[in-house]
Amino acid sequence: MKIDIPDEKRRVHEMLIPIRWGDMDAMGHINNTVYFRYMETARIDWVTSLGLALDPAGEGIVIVNAFCNFIRQFEYPGTVLIRTYVSAPGRSSFDTWVTMARTEQPELICATGGATVVWVNTAAQKSAPLPDRLRRQLVE
């Protein structure tokens, strides 16, 4: 299956997340909602690794859309390798793209996904220019 990551993307982060027993559903595989949690965890880990504090009373990121393509099942036990890519930086937004694979087969993609991220001023409830530190990560 083709991975829907644009050519102009830039890999910015990798993270390992252990699959928890409670991540499974009654069908014996990881519940579809958990994939979004994995993407969120990786996204927040990346942004905070840049030294950007996400301040609910100040500025931070908001997701305006998110998607996931389920290709192969994840099952317990195991560890998920999440690779995060970015593209299309604008004044206040950018796109993220994610691949998810098991660590023992890192090139066998089990899911892809992504989100459009907007940097916002929470108090004003409006978009705000991307911080310079974040913008450099998006374009370098």
Image (cartoon, grey):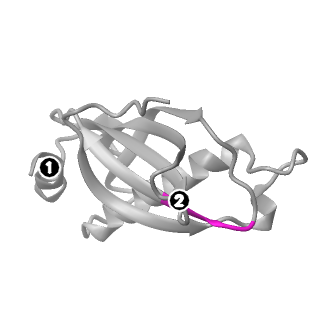
The percent coordinates of residue 41 (x first, y second) are 50, 59
Label located before the other in sequence (1 or 2)? 2
Residue drawn at 27 percent across, 52 percent down: 11
Q: Main secondary structure of the magenta part?
A: strand
The percent coordinates of residue 58 (x first, y second) are 32, 55
The amino acid on which the numbered mark 1 sits, given as a three-letter code, is Arg
Q: CA distance from mark 1 to mark 2?
A: 32 Å
Is residue 59 depicted above or below 87 in this figure? below
Is residue 53 depicted above or below 127 in this figure? below
Which image quadrant for residue 89?
A: top left
The magenta stretch spans which residues?
77-81
The percent coordinates of residue 29 (x first, y second) are 78, 50
Question: Considering the numbered disc 1 on the image, is that residue within a helix, a strand or a loop?
Answer: helix
Residue 132 sits inside the magenta stretch: no
Query: Mark 1 or 2, which is nearer the eye?
Result: 2
Q: Is residue 127 left or right of residue 122?
A: left
Residue 80 sits inside the magenta stretch: yes
Q: Is residue 68 visible?
A: yes
Is residue 13 depicted above or below 115 in this figure? below
Q: Nearer the viewer, residue 113 or 4?
A: 4
Q: Which residue is disc 2 drawn over?
A: 105
Q: Which residue is disc 1 drawn over?
A: 135
Residue drawn at 19 percent across, 54 percent down: 134
User: For the residue carrying disc 1, how many other residues have a C-alpha within 10 Å: few (<14), some (14-19), or many (20+)?
Assistant: some
Point out which mark residue 49 bears.
none
